[in-house]
Structures are given as C-alpha cells and as structure tokens.
Image (cartoon, coloured by chain):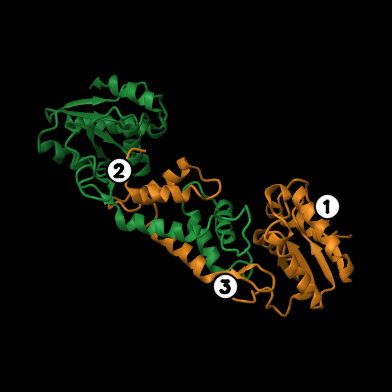
Chain colours: A green, B orange
Amino acid sequence: MTQGAVPPSVTQLIETFSELPGIGPKTASRLAFYLLRGRSELASPTSAPPALALRLAEALRNLVENTRFCSQCFNVTEQDPCPICADPTRDHGLLCVVEEPLDLLALERTEQYRGVFHVLNGALSPMEGIFAEDLRIKELELRLAKGGIREVILATNPTSEGDYTAAYLLGRLKNSGVRVTRLGRGLPMGGDLEYADAVTLTRALESRQEL
Amino acid sequence: MTQGAVPPSVTQLIETFSELPGIGPKTASRLAFYLLRGRSELASPTSAPPALALRLAEALRNLVENTRFCSQCFNVTEQDPCPICADPTRDHGLLCVVEEPLDLLALERTEQYRGVFHVLNGALSPMEGIFAEDLRIKELELRLAKGGIREVILATNPTSEGDYTAAYLLGRLKNSGVRVTRLGRGLPMGGDLEYADAVTLTRALESRQEL
C-alpha cells in the first residue's frame, strides 16, 4: 500500500485482523474499510451497523476482562467454578474429557449429557510440538485422585491426534480404578467433533465402549 | 448454545463478529475461541499471538478516534486535508472520481496516477435504495465550481451500477466546461476495481476516452 493513501490506524487494524485464523490481508482490508464506512455521515444500505467498530472493541475488552478458566474443568467461564461444575443436579461422578471448549459446547447441545467436563486445551501432537505437559493431564489426574469420579469418557476428536491422546490418557488412567470409556464410533474418522450434529453425538454417547 | 456452557461475554463477541461481512456464526465462534486460547497460561503452537484480543480492541478504538474523512476528497485520513490533497507535487487540475477508498488505493498502487481524487462513497443503485443524495456528488460539483480542475476521470467500477453512476455524473458535469473522461475499457466487465492488477489499471489510465 502507498503511504499517504492509507492512514496508519487503518494499516494497523488491517495487520491486526490478519493475525486471526482464516483472515488474509485482502479480507482484513475489506473488514477495516467496512468498519470505516459505518463512520460516514452519509448512511446507506451498504454501511456498517452504527458504532460496530466500537462495539467490537468493547466486546473484545469484555472477553479479556470477564473470562477466565474454571479451576475445576478449565472451560471458559465468567464465574469460578463454572455454571456446569457448580450445578448440583449434574452427575459429578461422570467426567467427559474434551480437547477444546467448542467440543464441550457440541456435547452440551445434545442435551443428553448430564455429567461434568474436563477441557484438555488441545490434543497431543509431537509433530506440532504439543506434549503431555502442554495439556491439562496432570490436573485430570489430580481430579481423579480426589475421588468421587466413577467413569471418565474420553471425547477427544476422531482424528489421529485425538486417538493418540485418548490412547495416551488410557495408559495413564488405567491404574486409577476408574472406568474409562470413549465415545462410540458413530463419528466419521477424520472429522471434527465441534461440527458433528446432535443426533450423531447422542448415538456416540449411548454407544460408548469400555477400553 | 446452552447457557452456562458459554459465558455472556463470549456470546456477545460471537454476535458482534457475526455483524462483519462474510463472517457467519460458525466463523465468529471460531474467532472468539481462538482469541480465548491466547489467554491460556499453557502456551502452544496453536495458541493465538499474545494479547491479540486487546491489540485488536485497541486498533479498533484507534480507527474510530484517529480517522476522519478528508474535507476535500473524502478519502479516509488522519489529517485534514489528507496527504494526497496536501501534496503540492500532485496535479490538482486532474481529478479522479472513485466509489470507495479501496478503489483509490488500487489506483495509487499503479504509481502512475499523479492527480487527486474524489471519493463518492459508493455507486448509484436505485434497487438498493442508493440515490444521488447518498453520494458525494454535490461536493464534487462544488469542487468543480471553485475552478482549477481541467479534467475529471470517472473511475467508477466496470459494473452496471458503476456505469450508471458514470453516465449520471456525465449528465451533471457536461455543462461545467471541464473535460470528462473515463477509464479505458481494459477492465473486464462485471469485475471489481479494487482487485484489478496494476498493469491493467495503468493501461486503463493511458487509454482513457473522451465522453
């Protein structure tokens, strides 16, 4: 871009947008100029909604200021423990281990699971440099050591990293005296848990197998 | 989404991201959780860059606070008049009329155009409810009335709306005594000016035709 033609604050926003996944410089520049159009005193049907840039800035700031990780399950939350961990009507003896908060959400959408969760923060991937100490595996063992959990459902993604993580966790948990199961293979191999539909996930919950 | 599983500040960010063009609820939710991952004390190669959410919030705030429209050409700028209008080495007798700031940028990238600009803020589109009073056409006539401009290049997009806008402008400007030209038809019909490569745009500038 020619200097002069693009003010520094626009360039800075384009560069910051480009750091988001799936957003290249072209899309970033479209987004920045779209937000600028909302500032024109000439309203038009193609203008951005009013104050969208400021509302987005505020939403980002709220995200950072108001959210933390639940000290029990490591899901994203505004209160600690999170509403799921604090819910006495849920089955705290049944623990479902997922990679990411979005996977937890996919399971919650089935409205069939009434246990609690443990969010690993990813899957093991030696290729990408993600090892056991990068995931919340020690915290999982500490939860099990406290007692009260009778079954752990390994709900990692049906990918090679997810399968490897599940196999690794089974190795570490098999002497804990806790029943370890995994989601039934109704899930298509190579898929991504968060995109699975509620029925497929419900089937997978029902047909979970002893490991 | 189930309440409880998604904190309000995450939901709010997802909804605000969804207001951006080309970003649906699925992408918005991916972006929000990507930014959250940057907050985990467990760093990993898939984590978001540090403080990305706050830097994005800051960039958005800077955009709103620091940018305005140039009072002469209506391009986005941090100082008024903008660096192009304030540049004494540019030809202030040659005025190129574009729809959007991104179109101005595409022309600047050719490094062949040394005149000044006028940004319309869109194209006429009766179907979408965009009429002459929604564009900076009155301001264009005021600039011409002040004198000193010997040629207006109509560089609207080679689309039906752009062609219609150029024809409409020609009608309003033909009695102004100013030469009115438009970009040569090296541009592919139905295309979008901002995606044209520099060579094509340079050809179009060279082969501009009398109307």
Q: Residue A95's x, y, as percent?
A: 21, 33
Q: Would you say residue B132 is visible in this rendering?
A: yes
Q: Quadrant of residue B97?
A: bottom right
Which residue shows up at 45% across the image and 56% down it?
A56
- Asked if the residues shown at circle 3 and circle 2 are in contact, with their CB atoms under 8 angstroms apart, the answer is no
Residue named by callout 2: A121
Circle 3: residue type: Glu
Report helix, strand or loop for mark 3.
Answer: loop
CA distance for labels 3 and 1: 34 Å
Q: Quadrant of residue A122?
A: top left
Which residue shows up at 30% across the image and 51% down it?
B40
State which quarter of the image contains the N terminus of chain B.
top left
Label 2 neighbour load within 10 Å: few <14, some 14-19, many 20+: many
Left or right side of B127 for A185: left
Circle 1: residue type: Arg
Nearest-to-viewer mark from 3 and 1: 3
Residue named by callout 3: B78
Is disc 3 in the same subunit as disc 1? yes
Is disc 2 in the same subunit as disc 1? no
Circle 2: residue type: Asn
Residue B185, numbered circle: 1
Nearest-to-viewer mark from 3 and 2: 3
Left or right side of B164 for A174: left
